């Protein structure tokens, strides 16, 4: 015998489907904020790391590689 599940609102209570949707929307918003912050951090890093390319924007991976090379070069200058 199949049991049907009702997803209707009952007063102020939300159905489990609505709760899941709200949680997913909240998680998506958090992830968007996290990625925005991460992308802004990469943009700030690109501004201070000397790039070999002219106008072309470095990828995240290239930015990290250049930052590592730059930090090592600065370290070598100090020692």
Image (cartoon, rainbow, N blue to C red):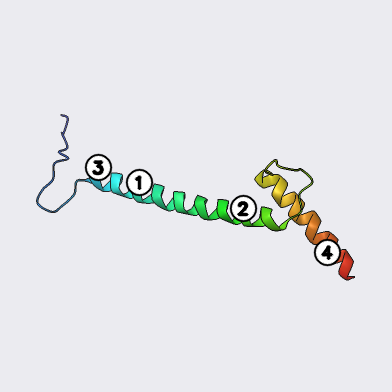
**Could you say where residue 7 lies in the image, as x and y percent from the top left?**
17, 40
Q: CA distance from mark 1 to mark 3?
A: 11 Å
Closer to the chain start, of discs 4 and 1, is: 1
Separation of residues labelled 2 and 1 (CA atoms): 28 Å
Q: Residue furthest front?
A: 55
Q: Is 72 situated left or right of 17 in this image? A: right
Q: Earlier in the sequence, mark 2 or mark 3?
A: 3
Q: Which quadrant of the figure has residue 2?
A: top left
Choose mark 2 or mark 1, whichever is in front: 2
Q: Which residue is mark 3?
A: 17
Q: Are marks 2 and 1 in contact (CB under 8 Å)?
A: no
* Residue at image point 45% right, 49% down: 32
| Crowdedness near tag 2: few (<14), some (14–19) or many (≥20) residues, C-alpha within 10 Å | some
Question: Disc 2 and disc 3: Cα gap in Å?
Answer: 39 Å
As drawn, the residue found furthest toward the left would be: 11
In-front residue for pair 72/22: 72
Q: Which residue is mark 4?
A: 74
Rendering coords of residue 72 (x, y %): 82, 60
Q: Quarter holding the C terminus?
A: bottom right
The foreground one among 11 and 26 is 26
Residue count near mark 3 (Cα–Cα under 10 Å), binned few <14, some 14–19, many ≥20: few
Q: CA distance from mark 4 to mark 3?
A: 55 Å
Q: Position of residue 11 (x, y in %)?
A: 9, 51
Cα separation between marks 4 and 1: 45 Å
Residue occupied by mark 1? 24
Calculate the distance from the C-alpha at mark 2 to the C-alpha at mark 4.
Answer: 21 Å
The first of marks 1 and 3 along the sequence is: 3
Q: Nearer the viewer, mark 4 or mark 3?
A: 4
């Amino acid at each position: 015998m199949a049991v049907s599940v009702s997803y209707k609102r009952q007063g102020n209570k939300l159905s489990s489907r609505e709760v899941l949707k709200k949680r997913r929307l909240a998680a998506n918003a958090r992830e968007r904020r996290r990625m925005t912050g991460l992308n802004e951090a990469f943009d700030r890093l690109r501004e201070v790391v000397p790039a070999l390319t002219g106008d072309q924007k470095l990828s995240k991976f290239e930015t990290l590689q250049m930052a590592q090379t730059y930090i090592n070069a600065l370290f070598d200058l100090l020692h």
